[in-house]
Amino acid sequence: MSIQWFPGHMAKAKREAKEKMKLIDVVIELLDARIPLSSRNPVIDEITGGKPRIIILNKADLADPEITKAWKAYFESEGHHVLEADAQKGKGVQGIGPAVREEAAGMIEKMKRKGMNPRAIRALILGIPNVGKSTLINRLASKKIARIGDRPGVTKSQQWIKVGKEMELLDTPGILWPKFDDEAVGYRLALTGAIKEELFDFQDSSAFLLKELKKSYPELLKSRYSLEELPDDLLALFDEIGRRRGCLISGGNIDYDRTAELIFRDFRAGKFGRVSLEQPAD
Ligand code: G4P
């Protein structure tokens, strides 16, 4: 993420997304499967203004599969079309075309009834930084990438990518700001990569992570650091991990900064296994 989200940036992002929305038939809302609510833009409904929308739970390869299933059911119960994906490997991406077609079926029918030749369905990817928008665009474009060029009334820089026969994708995604409303949301965003590392404290976010792992994935935590038991006390747990990983300062004391960063990097590298940091039941 190259910019911070000051109110002016948010207003601009919203304006740009709304501007793009005029060209769009179907919105593809990209969420991080590990934190679907925390990675959701708070005013997405207002921005999309009732356009047909599909939700992609991306990075599903890193998330707990059972919890991702529960999230899928949760969003489906809200009436959304939901898909799981691993945009990096291309898993689940093949379902997007048919889902977009299904969402646009009404529009196509209307055009046919009016005697018009149905045009390609136009889609836009929307999401917070680092959720995988560019990766997904590249995946969808694959080798068949074809720049279709400007359309009348469209800003010159807008380019469309042809995806299959019936869909066109705007080649620049809509970048939206994440939630900021509570501390836990901030930690989840930091741990999953939506917030620049310079902007948060490794000790705080790693402490949050250890609490979550202790509660929901104790076996994964034990296995990662070869611990037989998990101490009740968080500081004792930090000490144990630091000692085992040789994060020490003079006098044999624990280097908490290094220990915290190590835990953070282990999480970012998926070293604990498939972990979700948010559940619908929460
Ligand atoms: P953005 O446009 O929304 O900002 O995100 P982008 O596509 O740049 O993806 C951000 C990072 O997430 C990239 O890793 C990308 O490879 C990774 N990524 C995207 N989709 C998936 C997915 O489904 N699964 C996994 N495991 N990774 C995915 P990066 O450039 O290495 O950045 P970093 O996250 O390692 O810092």
Image: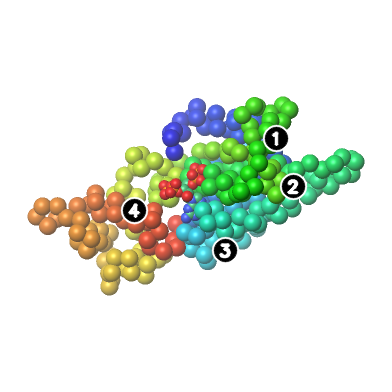
> Residue 1 at x, y = what percent?
44, 38
Verify CB contact (< 8 Å) between mark 3 and mark 2. no
* Residue position for label 4: 265
* Mark closest to the chain's N terminus, 1 or 2: 1
- Asked if the beta carbon under badge 4 is closer than 8 A to the nearest atom of ligand 1, the reply is no
Residue occupying the far left of the picture: 251
In 3D space, how far apart are the residues under numbered discs 1 and 2 (Cα atoms)? 16 Å
> Residue 37 at x, y = what percent?
52, 50
In 3D space, how far apart are the residues under numbered discs 3 and 2 (Cα atoms)? 29 Å
228 is higher (above) or lower (below) than 205: below
Q: Under tag 1, what secondary structure?
A: loop
* Residue position for label 3: 69
* Residue position for label 2: 166
Residue 200 vs residue 261, the one in the foreground: 261
Closer to the observer: label 3 or label 2? 2
* Residue position for label 1: 23
* Mark closest to the chain's N terminus, 3 or 4: 3
Q: Tag 1: residue type? A: Leu
Q: Tag 2: residue type? A: Glu
Closer to the observer: label 1 or label 2? 2
- Asked if the beta carbon under badge 3 is closer than 8 A to the nearest atom of ligand 1, the reply is no
